[in-house]
Amino acid sequence: MTTDEFRRYAHKLADWMAGYMENVEKYPVKSTVKPGEIFNRLPDVPPEHPESFDNIIRDIEEIIMPGITHWQSPNFFAYFPANASPPSILAEMITATLGAQCMIWETSPAAAELEEKVMNWLRDMIGLPGYFQGVIQDTASTATLAAILTAREKSTGFSVNENGFSNDKRLRVYCSEQAHSSVEKAVKIAGIGRKNLVKIGVLPDFSIDCRKLEEAVTKDIREGFVPCCVIATLGTTGTTAVDRLRPVGEICKENHVWLHVDAAMGGTALILPEYRWMIDGSEYIDSFVFNPHKWMFTNFDCSAFFIRYPELLIRTFEILPEYLKTRTRGQVNDYRDWGIPLGRRFRALKLWSVIRSYGTEGLREKIRYHLSIASNIAEMISKENDFELLAPVVLNTVCFRYKPAGKVEDQLNILNQKLNHLLNDSGKIYLTHTSLNGRYTLRMVTGQTNVTMAHAEKAWQIIMSVARNIQL
Ligand SMILES: *Cc1c(COP(=O)(O)O)cnc(C)c1O
């Protein structure tokens, strides 16, 4: 493709992109294709000869688009959001065009220094103490793995990196029963072993029971285990429950245990002064992750990882082959030593673009609006006799179920599962579920970039009418 052709297609695609944003509500939110449908429409062998880009665009429209679930639809209330926004998309276009691989300072000084600056902005925006330093990771899963690996090295005097696990005492990691599955994955990968992940029971509000945490740590020490890391969650994936950092942190400090905070979705709310209570106890935190790619209008992937003592992280990950030796080493941040991959995308650009385009006050306004939608919906749900809320509404997520009179628990579970499938298959809205105390629970998350009260109200009308028409 020549640059002239590129220019022509780029203009055409810019129109396509703006049109998509304007029309995203016209697609079924959740793709309706069956397994294998897209695969079978694609040729089994690649083309031998060049194809025109027009053909590629045509196939994107005809084959690919039907298999897309529209995360950027304001009728997307499923999972947690993966927000995009125009300033983020524009910056991604530049990142793609530059195609810089930002593994070390020298391979693009601006990328390293912008990342350092923007992460300082973000740290101050969410109220973390000024001694934290930040690095952008691809996902919260990777950041949590990096935290657990660093905690592992710290608690073994950096010996596992050197010798592997030998006959040392077994390490223990703790999180609540409501913590994200990425914790379990990280514990497996880190060689600590899933059996050494201790899942602590929760209080009625689904936050960690600190008394049980303390008991578990004390018991483990008595039995010869080494408590290594506690993961506290600010905004659990099921219900956005918030673990209390201060009592958790005191237990960690007392027992020399690393405190990692997973605020993947909820961290965004910390830009609001009225939500700063969530990091009361921040002086105990060793590492912290939150995802601007979830609820801060920055395209996937962009996960903000903050660390109190970067030297521990760097010592855990550092490698120095001859071909990566530079004259600036030690004077600058070489982010390849701050995590798992060597190669790194220029992700700071989109984050910078988003923060500048909205402004911190503009971001706060949007987040407050999303939070107000969730509390309005919760209020509407609580007014209906045949529906019930199943968890406190702390952030942007409402957990509820349909509960007509005269049904036992098993029937209610079947009924709500059916309701969820009918709603999603309708293409009008998309919700996902969790299980709370054995109850099939619908979750409605009001965090999509362009969601409005009108979208949420319409969704609630649809939910009520579909529920009340189900014949079991
Ligand atoms: C979404 C989520 C994660 C995982 O995020 P990725 O960036 O997809 O790895 C981890 N923890 C919590 C609490 C989450 O909600």
Image (tube, rainbow, N blue to C red):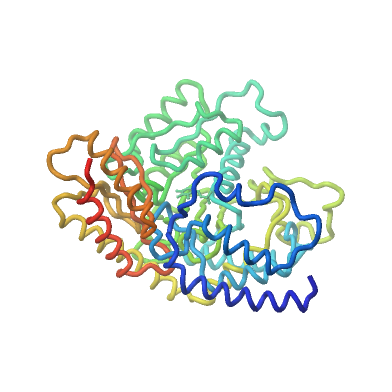
Q: How many marks?
A: 0
Image position of 1 (left or right of 76): right
Image coordinates of residue 133 in percent, x first then y, are: 59, 58
- Residue visible at 55% across and 28% down in the picture: 193
Q: Answer above or below: position of 198 versus 139.
A: above
On the image, the x and y values in percent for residue 288 come to 51, 52
Q: Is residue 116 visible?
A: no
318 to the left or right of 15 = right
**In the image, residue 245 lies at what x, y percent?**
40, 48
Residue at image position (60%, 76%) is: 14
The residue under the point 43% across, 59% down is 29
**Residue 422 versus residue 200: which sits nearer the camera?**
422
Q: Is residue 390 left or right of residue 175?
A: left
Q: Position of residue 110 (x, y in %)?
A: 71, 69
In this view, the residue in front, 24 or 271, is 24
Residue nearest the viewer, comparing 36 with 133:
36
| Farthest residue, direction right | 322
Q: Quadrant of residue 11?
A: bottom right
Which quadrant is the C terminus positioned in?
Answer: top left
Q: Residue at x 70, y 47 (%)?
A: 44
Residue 447 to residue 472: above or below = below
Residue 332 appearing in the image: yes
From what the image shows, is residue 276 above or below residue 149? Answer: below
